[in-house]
Image (tube, helix red, strand yellow):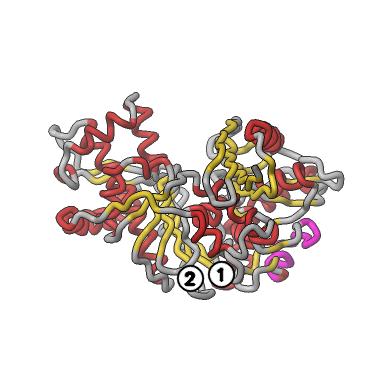
Amino acid sequence: MTSLVGLDIGTSGVKALALSAEGEVVERVEEEYPLSIPQPGWAEQDPEDWVLGAERALRRLGAEVERVGLSGQMHGLVALDSERRVLRPAILWNDQRTAAECAEIEDRIGLERLIELTGNRALPGFTAPKLLWLRRHEPEIYERIAHVLLPKDYVRLRLFDELATDAADASGTLLFDVAGRRWSEEVLEALEIPAEWLPPVGESTEVAGAGDQAAGAIGVGVHDPGLASVVLGTSGVVFAPLAGYRRPDPQGRAHVFCHAVPRCWHAMGVMLSAAGSLGWFRRICDAPLGALDDEAAEWEPRAEGITFLPYLAGERTPHADPDARGAFVGLSLRHDRGALARAVMEGVAYGLRDCLEVVQELGCDVVAGRASGGGARSELWLRIVASVLGMPLQRTVVEEGAAYGAALLGGVAAGVFSDVREAVEACVRVRDEIEPDAEWASRYAEGYERFRALYPALRGAT
């Protein structure tokens, strides 16, 4: 049997899927690897762990592979020397050490010009500020850099001896001209970063890969305007394709990136603690997720006035505030564990509504969402999110969106499918749909207004 294979190089491990040419999952495996936090706010990994995990996953699949598609965590910095050896642990997307470097980038280039060129403002998770941090704090490492790669592209180099990236993943570096789909000479010159450090850029269908959000969108069938990818993973995402390149939000509240579909773009709002918020609450309560789901269902919407702000790790959309912090507001003696769990679900839904509102302002006409991520396994949570967003949410048969999308991109690159649309139409199938609850939607409209008012009030009090 000839299979298409998708590898997703995630933060906690690699997921691998083997597909038939009809898109059916033949085999799925996962390999975990560790995350290092050497200082508060830092996040690093050994790139060798990604390679070993990918190699083990491919061996376990045991499939006859026609083409491997790659997806992976975005923004991470892998610095290599002239012999293509890793110079230090990779600095990851959720690393928060680069606030000073972000300010430096916006000062050097100008905020308005930076957003115009790259589709984004400077945020700590992006790749460019990590390079400036290395130059300032580890100059002996910086001086030895010959190549800069993103996580999945280092795996590509090691497995297939190919030095390349794609426009979708490159969009998250802050070094990329998103409108022109090429490295930005102006940004590189302003930041004094050599262009020769960066790999050649192709379309996702040429190099068989994309960053995890673009690959995940393909994996749930979000390739044209009208649908949005709504991700309830550790972070939360509203990802909506654009009809054409649009000038980014002048405040940089949302991202404008290249999509994995050639000559297409997307707008994306990102909240940093979505299912991660419920995971945090579960850990401190030492309770199974199923129990929290059941207990949350016993409470009516808004749980008698309690509101949760999900800013446990700062926030990206719409506040771009790494110092934002979470809170429960409106607690009473009647509230129990179930009430707090429901408030967490609702607070995350409000955060996703923030993301949706911003991408809609950029011209995205969204009529329905395709839900994915661990939180999407909860029908209660999806009903809450659908009611807050005011649109139906659909779940697809295959849950591993990024790995599945990577496999489909590999299929296009191998000629199994003529383009992304053919791959999606042939393979992606909707399993069920959760409609908004009209009564809940009315109550959540009031709750959302309260949620929006709380962030500036709490920020002003700190």
Residue drawn at 26 percent across, 49 percent down: 384
Q: Which residue is mark 2?
A: 242
* 261 vs 443, nearest the viewer: 261
**Magenta run includes residue 376:** no
Residue drawn at 72 percent across, 47 percent down: 156
Query: Over which residues does the magenta segment extend?
Result: 186-197
Instruction: Please give left or right for residue 81 compared with residue 65 in the image.
Output: right
* 29 vs 367, nearest the viewer: 29
Instruction: Please give left or right for residue 29 compared with residue 272 in the image.
Output: right
Residue 168 spot, x, y in % from top left: 60, 60
Residue drawn at 15 percent across, 55 percent down: 439
Q: Which mark is residue 264?
A: 1
Looking at the image, the residue that sits furthest to the top is 286
Looking at the image, the residue that sits furthest to the front is 1
Three-letter amino acid code of the residue under disc 2: Leu
Q: Is residue 212 visible?
A: yes
Quarter containing the N terminus:
top right
For the residues labelled 2 and 1, the Cα–Cα distance comes to 7 Å
Instruction: Please give left or right for residue 362 compared with residue 83 in the image.
Output: left
Residue 344 spot, x, y in % from top left: 30, 42
Look at the numbered discs 2 and 1 and tell me whether their residues touch, using CB distance below 8 Å: yes
Residue 436 position (above or below residue 462)? below
Secondary structure mostly seen in the magenta stretch: helix
Residue drawn at 74 percent across, 67 percent down: 189
Looking at the image, the residue that sits furthest to the right is 83
Residue 453 spot, x, y in % from top left: 26, 57
Q: Secondary structure at mark 1?
A: loop
Characterize the local packing of mark 1: few (<14), some (14-19) or many (20 or more) Cα atoms within 10 angstroms. Answer: many
**Magenta run includes residue 194:** yes
Q: Which of the two discs, 2 and 1, labels the residue nearer the N terminus?
A: 2
Three-letter amino acid code of the residue under disc 1: Cys
Residue 38 position (above or below residue 406)? above
